[in-house]
Image (tube, coloured by chain):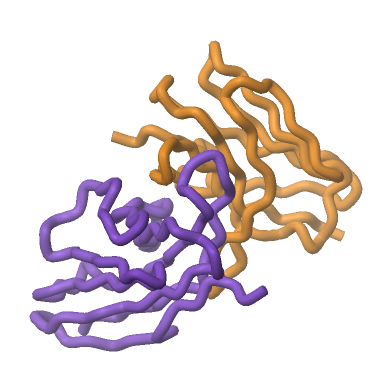
Amino acid sequence: KAGVTQTPRYLIKTRGQQVTLSCSPISGHRSVSWYQQTPGQGLQFLFEYFSETQRNKGNFPGRFSGRQFSNSRSEMNVSTLELGDSALYLCASSLEGSYTEAFFGQGTRLTVV
Amino acid sequence: DQQVKQNSPSLSVQEGRISILNCDYTNSMFDYFLWYKKYPAEGPTFLISISSIKDKNEDGRFTVFLNKSAKHLSLHIVPSQPGDSAVYFCAAGNTGKLIFGQGTTLQVKP
């Protein structure tokens, strides 16, 4: 059974640009959540998608957005990149999003220069 | 507002001894809690979880204890092995939203 796949693994962007990250969840999982991990911070929740709908949202500015497709694959977009957006972005998939374990991908390491 | 806190950034124990990792939370609405283990350049790996209606859950060498009145949970690893050396995150949440602590780096010395 394939795990959670995130692409690309590494990305370097210039300040002001935008970026799109992709996450393919485990087959059958309908919930996809996104997290940001920066040095000195724990994993911070960005948003969760379930059946193509954003169900939960963290405290990030509107520059961070996402969507989920009918096959449960999800994309996250960050517009007008800032240096502080440099981080490891992780997505996690779970069956229903509650009372279940979330399985994480290896993450996308975004560096903004 | 840090709703989930791991106050010890690091812990070092000897192989074969017990490792105890602690986590405190502030929101009494959390209904489940999880522990994850993370190696550098990898995503977190699920270890063990506990529902808010329980006070203990055991899986092999790993046991999680939940004290709801104190809003405190702990992960016990017995016996500790060098391969357990990693960053451990506790997480709390409901309905798909997980709030993570900042992590504790565990080093198990041979």
User: Extreme front residue here?
Assistant: A70
The percent coordinates of residue B64 (x first, y second) are: 70, 34
Seen at 11% across and 59% down, the residue is A62
Report the front residue among B77 and A35: A35
Name which quarter of the figure residue A51 lies in: bottom left
With A93 as the anchor, is B88 left or right in this view? right
The percent coordinates of residue A37 (x first, y second) are: 39, 61
With A67 as the anchor, is A24 left or right in this view? right
Location of the C terminus of chain B (image quadrant): bottom right
Report the front residue among A93 and B38: A93
The colour one sees for chain B in the rendered image is: orange
The colour one sees for chain A in the rendered image is: purple
Q: Is residue A88 visible?
A: no
Report the front residue among A99 and B69: A99
Name which quarter of the figure residue A6 lies in: bottom left
With A18 as the anchor, is B19 left or right in this view? right
Seen at 29% across and 48% down, the residue is A55
From what the image shows, is residue A32 above or below residue B48? below
Seen at 41% across and 74% down, the residue is A23
User: Extreme top residue here?
Assistant: B69
Q: Is residue B31 visible?
A: yes
Name which quarter of the figure residue B19 lies in: top right
From what the image shows, is residue B77 above or below residue B81? above
From what the image shows, is residue B55 above or below residue B91? above
